[in-house]
Amino acid sequence: MKIHTTNYFDTFIEVAEDTKAYCGTKPSTKDKKTVAEMQYDLIAKNPYKYTSDDIFFQVFADRNDLIKTEYKQAREQFFSKGQPCFRASPLTKTYGFGIHCDNDGKVALYGMETEEYQEFLTDPKVKKCKAMKSSRQK
Protein backbone atom coordinates (compact mmCIF):
# COMPACT_ATOMS: atom_id res chain seq x y z
CA MET A 1 0.00 0.00 0.00
CA LYS A 2 1.38 3.40 -0.97
CA ILE A 3 1.65 5.89 1.87
CA HIS A 4 1.20 9.58 1.07
CA THR A 5 2.54 12.50 3.09
CA THR A 6 1.73 16.16 3.69
CA ASN A 7 5.18 16.92 5.10
CA TYR A 8 7.41 19.69 3.75
CA PHE A 9 11.07 20.23 4.67
CA ASP A 10 12.94 23.56 4.93
CA THR A 11 9.85 25.25 3.54
CA PHE A 12 7.75 28.27 4.49
CA ILE A 13 4.09 28.22 3.49
CA GLU A 14 2.98 31.83 3.06
CA VAL A 15 -0.56 33.08 3.61
CA ALA A 16 -2.87 32.93 0.60
CA GLU A 17 -2.73 35.89 -1.79
CA ASP A 18 -6.45 36.54 -1.27
CA THR A 19 -6.51 36.26 2.52
CA LYS A 20 -8.59 38.91 4.25
CA ALA A 21 -6.42 38.69 7.37
CA TYR A 22 -4.05 41.49 8.35
CA CYS A 23 -2.33 39.50 11.08
CA GLY A 24 -2.30 36.02 12.56
CA THR A 25 -5.56 35.56 14.42
CA LYS A 26 -6.42 32.64 16.69
CA PRO A 27 -9.46 30.79 15.29
CA SER A 28 -12.54 31.60 17.35
CA THR A 29 -13.96 29.02 19.71
CA LYS A 30 -17.22 27.36 18.75
CA ASP A 31 -19.34 24.82 20.64
CA LYS A 32 -17.45 22.05 18.88
CA LYS A 33 -13.80 22.77 18.04
CA THR A 34 -13.21 23.52 14.36
CA VAL A 35 -10.42 21.92 12.34
CA ALA A 36 -8.62 25.30 12.29
CA GLU A 37 -8.87 25.61 16.07
CA MET A 38 -7.60 22.06 16.60
CA GLN A 39 -4.66 22.62 14.22
CA TYR A 40 -3.86 25.96 15.86
CA ASP A 41 -3.89 24.51 19.39
CA LEU A 42 -1.58 21.62 18.48
CA ILE A 43 0.97 23.84 16.71
CA ALA A 44 0.82 26.95 18.92
CA LYS A 45 1.34 24.91 22.11
CA ASN A 46 4.02 22.68 20.54
CA PRO A 47 6.13 24.61 18.01
CA TYR A 48 8.48 22.32 16.06
CA LYS A 49 7.28 19.22 17.94
CA TYR A 50 5.05 17.68 15.27
CA THR A 51 5.20 17.14 11.53
CA SER A 52 2.37 18.16 9.26
CA ASP A 53 1.35 14.48 9.01
CA ASP A 54 1.23 14.27 12.84
CA ILE A 55 -1.05 17.33 13.04
CA PHE A 56 -3.46 16.23 10.30
CA PHE A 57 -3.73 12.70 11.67
CA GLN A 58 -4.23 13.89 15.28
CA VAL A 59 -7.06 16.20 14.21
CA PHE A 60 -8.62 13.31 12.27
CA ALA A 61 -8.23 10.97 15.28
CA ASP A 62 -9.73 13.50 17.70
CA ARG A 63 -12.67 14.29 15.42
CA ASN A 64 -13.40 10.58 15.02
CA ASP A 65 -12.95 9.71 18.71
CA LEU A 66 -10.22 7.17 18.00
CA ILE A 67 -8.43 5.54 20.91
CA LYS A 68 -4.63 5.19 20.97
CA THR A 69 -4.72 1.45 20.19
CA GLU A 70 -6.47 2.27 16.89
CA TYR A 71 -3.90 4.89 15.82
CA LYS A 72 -1.38 2.72 13.95
CA GLN A 73 -3.88 1.07 11.61
CA ALA A 74 -6.00 4.22 11.28
CA ARG A 75 -2.93 6.30 10.38
CA GLU A 76 -1.91 3.83 7.66
CA GLN A 77 -5.45 3.95 6.30
CA PHE A 78 -5.60 7.76 6.55
CA PHE A 79 -2.38 8.24 4.56
CA SER A 80 -3.17 5.49 2.03
CA LYS A 81 -4.83 8.26 0.04
CA GLY A 82 -3.58 11.80 -0.47
CA GLN A 83 -4.58 14.38 2.13
CA PRO A 84 -4.70 18.18 1.80
CA CYS A 85 -1.59 19.88 3.21
CA PHE A 86 -1.14 23.16 5.09
CA ARG A 87 -1.40 25.05 1.79
CA ALA A 88 -5.15 24.26 2.02
CA SER A 89 -5.49 24.85 5.77
CA PRO A 90 -7.75 27.62 7.11
CA LEU A 91 -4.74 28.78 9.17
CA THR A 92 -2.88 29.85 6.01
CA LYS A 93 -5.93 30.77 3.91
CA THR A 94 -8.11 32.63 6.41
CA TYR A 95 -6.39 33.25 9.75
CA GLY A 96 -3.18 34.97 8.58
CA PHE A 97 -0.56 32.41 9.61
CA GLY A 98 2.47 31.21 7.73
CA ILE A 99 3.69 27.70 8.50
CA HIS A 100 7.41 27.00 8.73
CA CYS A 101 8.58 23.41 8.23
CA ASP A 102 12.11 22.82 9.51
CA ASN A 103 14.64 20.34 8.10
CA ASP A 104 13.00 17.51 10.10
CA GLY A 105 9.54 18.45 8.78
CA LYS A 106 8.43 19.78 12.18
CA VAL A 107 6.09 22.78 11.98
CA ALA A 108 5.52 26.11 13.73
CA LEU A 109 3.23 29.00 12.87
CA TYR A 110 3.99 32.68 12.47
CA GLY A 111 1.52 35.52 12.13
CA MET A 112 1.93 37.47 8.90
CA GLU A 113 2.59 40.63 10.93
CA THR A 114 5.66 39.21 12.74
CA GLU A 115 9.34 39.88 12.14
CA GLU A 116 9.95 36.12 11.88
CA TYR A 117 7.41 35.85 9.04
CA GLN A 118 9.28 38.56 7.11
CA GLU A 119 12.63 36.87 7.82
CA PHE A 120 11.38 33.59 6.32
CA LEU A 121 10.31 35.46 3.18
CA THR A 122 13.81 36.85 2.67
CA ASP A 123 15.82 33.77 3.74
CA PRO A 124 17.35 32.23 0.59
CA LYS A 125 17.86 28.85 2.35
CA VAL A 126 14.12 28.37 2.91
CA LYS A 127 11.84 27.28 0.05
CA LYS A 128 8.63 29.29 -0.18
CA CYS A 129 5.19 28.38 -1.44
CA LYS A 130 1.90 30.19 -1.07
CA ALA A 131 -1.24 28.82 0.48
CA MET A 132 -4.04 28.09 -1.98
CA LYS A 133 -6.40 30.92 -2.79
CA SER A 134 -9.88 30.75 -1.30
CA SER A 135 -11.55 31.81 -4.53
CA ARG A 136 -10.96 30.49 -8.02
CA GLN A 137 -11.20 33.91 -9.63
CA LYS A 138 -8.02 35.65 -10.74
Image: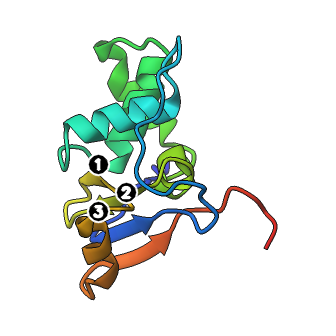
Closer mark to the observer between disc 3 and disc 1: 3
Neighbor class of circle 3 (other Cα within 10 Å; few <14, some 14-19, many 20+) is few
Closer mark to the observer between disc 2 and disc 3: 3
For badge 2, the amino acid type reads Asn
Residue situated in front as seen by the camera: 119 or 69? 119
Tell me the residue that label 3 is attached to: 114
Q: Circle 3 — which element?
A: loop
Q: Earlier in the sequence, mark 2 or mark 3?
A: 2
**Percent x, y for residue 20?**
60, 55
Tell me the residue that label 2 is attached to: 7
**Percent x, y for residue 33?**
48, 20
Report how far apart the C-alphas of labels 1 and 2 lie in the structure. 6 Å
Above/below status of 110 relative to 68: below
Neighbor class of circle 2 (other Cα within 10 Å; few <14, some 14-19, many 20+) is some
Residue drawn at (30%, 84%), measured in percent from left and top?
A: 122
**Percent x, y for residue 88?**
57, 53
Residue drawn at (37%, 37%), measured in percent from left and top?
A: 40
Residue situated in front as seen by the camera: 107 or 111? 111
For badge 3, the amino acid type reads Thr
